[in-house]
Image: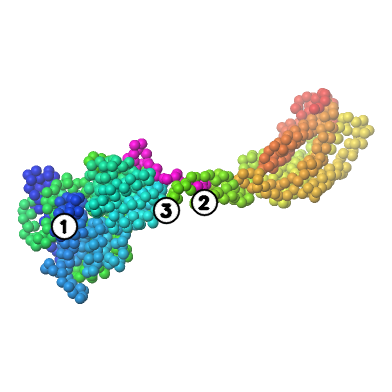
Amino acid sequence: MPGSTAVGLGLIALLGFGMGAPLCLSRQLKMQGNYMLGGLFPLASVEEDDPCNRTQLNSTVCTRFSSFGLLWALAVKMAVEEINNQSTLLPGLSLGYDFFDTCSEPVVAMKPSLLFLTETGSRNISAYCNYAQYQPRVLAVIGPHSSELALVTGKFFGFFLMPQVSYGASMDRLSNRETFPSFFRTVSSDRVQLTATVELLQALEWNWVAAVGSDDEYGRQGLSVFSSLANARNICIAHEGLLPLPCADGLQPSKVQDLLYQVNQSNVQVVVLFASARAAHFFFRHSIHLGLSPKVWVASEAWLTSDLVRELPGIDQVGTVLGFLQQGAPLPQFSHYVETCLSLAADPAFCASLKAKNLSLEEHVVGPRCPQCDHITLQNLSSGLQHHQTFAAYAAVYSVAQALHNTLQCNASRCPAEKSVQPWQLLENMYNMSFHAGNLTLQFNSSGDVYMEYELKLWVWQKPTPELRTVGTYNGSLQLMPSKMSWHTPDKRMPVSQCSQQCKDGQVRRAKGFHSCCYDCVDCKAGSYRKKPDDITCTSCEEHQWSPERSTSCLPRRPRFLAWGEPVVLLLLLLLCLTLSLVLAALGLFICHHNSPLVQASGGPMACFGLACLGLVCLSVLLFPGRPSSASCLAQQPLSHLPLTGCLSTLFLQAAETFAESELSPSWGHWLHGHLQGYWAWLGVLLAVLTEAALCTWYLVAFSPDVVTNWQELPTEALVHCRVRSWISFGLVHATNATLAFLCFLSTFLVQSRPGRYNRARGLTFAMLAYFITWISFVPLLANVQIVYQPAVQMGAILLCALGILATFHLPKCYLLLWQPKLNTPEFFLGRGPRDDRSRVGNGSGEEGTQGKTN
């Protein structure tokens, strides 16, 4: 056809054929080929009351046109033409087709089904003992669309083992291979759709729903599958009912009203309606008439996209409609193909050629194929061009072509010459077969089903019919798109459908009424938990466990102690590093200058020993952090107090020496001075240390500290600490050090300084003041702090005591050694040399003596 003619015809089709000329689209529903396919499509439907008035076998009249049925037929037609035009599946061979209307009625669908099974070249079905060589008119059947029709035709075709590939029948019962041995489908079973529905209810926390099914095989089985899946997921069905079909009997309006009343009285906000399109139309028509309050309707695939329901007047009053639709591969070329078919159908020459080719007697048997198809426009079909089952119909043809390819043992370039193929031979190659359709690879499972993803669709209310918006997907698991969801409710919020609000974690149910979903929620108190979701009482935790309020389990009590990583410990460790660094620096400086007058005046080796003891005092704080053990509990007090005794004893010797030189007569002072040096001095230090060791031994033997675990002190943790069995004995351990410090302070506080001499008494006085201030503050702080932080208080007291002694007594000497070396003379520190020089030097230093008493 010339391009201008095609464009002209396309415009005619788009404009709706204003001249009124009929199309010949119905003649395109048949085409000859080497192998014929039968097709069953809902090209039309009966008026609502027609099935009720059927009294004769030929009295069914199909007058209501179905655009979806025609589009599915055109999708099959397009697939056949693609296969015939390509050279991969059936090179050198062609498929033909013969499509008929089912009118969505079993009585109508049976006529073409019988015709498909007639022998080639006749209209007879002969009776044979063995049908192995029986050659029917078609090799396979595409369709029908509905499960109700498939239940009828599936058994019929199954007797002859003729492959039947449905593009819409989803009933789970059709997967039974014993009953339907030749049935296949390019859609998933209803069980997959209903599993997705149950997951949707769970995801939106709707556990109080009504379930309504149409009173036919499709609705009853769907309702049964949904009930079992819902019960397994703790979803309560407040009311479950069957919706009578139109004209099922004379009382169907009252039955529908009773069903609507029960749904309304059950106070549910969500209704799962698993019904055929005609039954859903009948149900909603009465619902709108009676003014049923808006609900959330979870639709089955059968009526979610039905124009019969979507075009119902007042349908926007029913509420929110959600449902799952199978997601196939896109067919971008399909819209252009439909437009081309309409353009050709408006061409008189093309129509005349079809009339000459398709002369047959079938229409005298089954009636006109689709008289309504010859009076349509592209506008009539535009709303259904993207229907989800268009791809399913398209894929059904490719499944049959792939099976024929395998049966004929074709390769990519050629097939054997045309030979006779019986339907049962084709069927053998379809079990568990993989095939390609569009850009997808599909496979029939052992039940003849394929698995495909679903899209969750939401009705968006637009005039005149609602549009479908994708708000989620399902591919074994549900993924929602909350931002795209909208709710057709007065407040535009998602409805809540629960008999009782779902108990939160840590709450137990107190049942009320008959339904398990109706209950009160009671909180579990701290120290108890909800053991099982259906518990009616809380279970108490064991001693070594804890739980907060409203808990579902008990947690093990984590051992709590002063850990190394706690901020207070890290801060104390920084203080330890600072203090220990200063001690080691002072000790190193004293050792390097051990012969200097300053070091000699400070005691020489005794001063170095005191600094070493001070370093050990600092290191003893490392026993306090970390998990307590028996060894650490026993070692804490002795290893912190014994080195402190050694340090304080050296300071006491210097204080006594200073007191003797300053306050006693020369004879007594000289005698005492001689006994405070040499081995006598070391003997005094040893005596002090042994006294402290004796006290520590008594403390460890009589009141041995031990590791205990306190389960009551902390609400969520088990406090592990060193228990002090006697605070009096703990205080007596400090007695030796406190006595030495007091005597040292008393000795230096009363000393008069000499002009021009280094004032050693001042440093000793302040050192002892630092000791007393630290340990006096320690007592109330230790008594008031939590037990877990008592080791930190002891650490801080030990470090501050050491730092105070170091800063007030040793560091000024280090300053003089480093930055005032001129003062490091025997005259200044040992009292030898001209008095005026000593006086001059004393007046120029912050560490030298001044007139008056030293404080």
Residue at the spot 67% in from the left edge and 47% down from the top edge: 710
Q: Earlier in the sequence, mark 2 or mark 3?
A: 3
Relative to 626, is 733 on the left or the right? Answer: right
**Residue 256, image x, y percentages:** 29, 48
Which residue is the site of mark 3? 233
Q: Secondary structure at mark 3?
A: loop
| Coordinates of residue 247 in the picture (x, y in percent) | 23, 52
Give amino acid for label 1: Thr
In reply to whether residue 507 is colored magenta, the answer given is: yes
Q: In the shown orientation, is residue 656 left or right of residue 81?
A: right
Q: CA distance from mark 2 to mark 1?
A: 60 Å
Which of labels 3 and 1 is toward the front?
1
Q: CA distance from mark 3 to mark 1?
A: 47 Å
Q: Main secondary structure of the magenta part?
A: loop
**Contact? badges 3 and 1 (CB < 8 Å):** no
Q: Residue 180 versus residue 221: which sits nearer the camera? A: 221
Q: Which residue is mark 2?
A: 535
SS at badge 2: loop
Q: Residues within 10 Å of mark 1 (few under 14, many from 20)?
A: few
Question: Which amino acid type corresponds to the residue marked 2 in the rendered image?
Answer: Asp
| Earlier residue among tags 2 and 1 | 1
The quarter holding residue 671 reads: top right
Q: Quadrant of the C terminus?
A: top right
| Residue with the mark numbered 1 | 55
- Rounded to the nearest angstrom, the CA distance separating label 2 from label 3 is 17 Å
Residue extending furthest toward the bottom: 129
Tag of residue 574: none
Left or right: residue 340 compared with residue 666:
left
In this rendering, does residue 77 appear at all? no
Name which residue type carries label 3.
Answer: Arg
